Image (cartoon, helix red, strand yellow):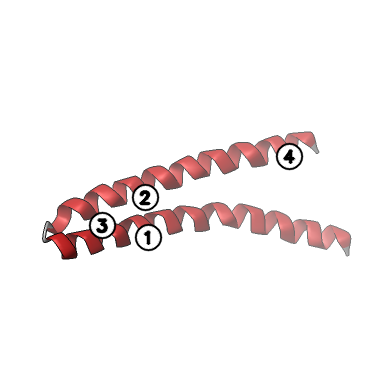
């Protein structure tokens, strides 16, 4: 039973990487869209904030990947 929980925990850990990437891009897109609607600068803030979301997502992807690799080497 304990081994089964460990496997589920591993799946949840690695799925968090994808969820965090998607959430970063979605939040960036929402902020950019909202600013464009508010200021009337149609695609510019959306493009900028989507780019910021991608950068943030990749940064967290690299950070979490390094963390999980280190954890797997320690075990």
The answer to whether the residues at label 4 and label 3 have Cβ atoms under 8 Å apart is no
Q: Name the residue under label 1.
A: 26
Mark 3 crowd level (few <14, some 14–19, many ≥20, 10 Å Cα) = many
Of label 4 and label 1, which has the lower sequence position?
A: 1
Disc 4 or disc 2, which is closer to the eye? 2
Horizontal side of 29 relative to 35 (left or right) equals right
Query: Which residue lies at the image location 30% right of the left edge and 52% below the top edge?
Result: 50
The answer to whether the residues at label 2 and label 1 have Cβ atoms under 8 Å apart is yes
Q: Name the residue under label 4.
A: 72
Of label 4 and label 2, which has the lower sequence position?
A: 2
Mark 2 crowd level (few <14, some 14–19, many ≥20, 10 Å Cα) = many
C-alpha separation, residue under disc 4 versus residue under disc 2: 28 Å
C-alpha separation, residue under disc 1 versus residue under disc 3: 10 Å
Query: Which residue lies at the image location 66% right of the left edge and 37% below the top edge?
Result: 69
The answer to whether the residues at label 4 and label 2 have Cβ atoms under 8 Å apart is no
Q: Residue 53 carries which label?
A: 2
Disc 4 or disc 3, which is closer to the eye? 3
């Amino acid at each position: 039973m304990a081994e089964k929980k460990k496997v589920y925990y591993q799946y949840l850990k690695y799925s968090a990487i994808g969820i965090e990437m998607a959430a970063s891009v979605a939040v960036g897109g929402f902020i950019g869209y909202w600013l464009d609607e508010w200021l009337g600068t149609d695609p510019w803030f959306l493009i900028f904030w989507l780019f910021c979301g991608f950068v943030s997502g990749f940064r967290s992807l690299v950070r979490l990947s390094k963390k999980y690799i280190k954890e797997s080497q320690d075990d």
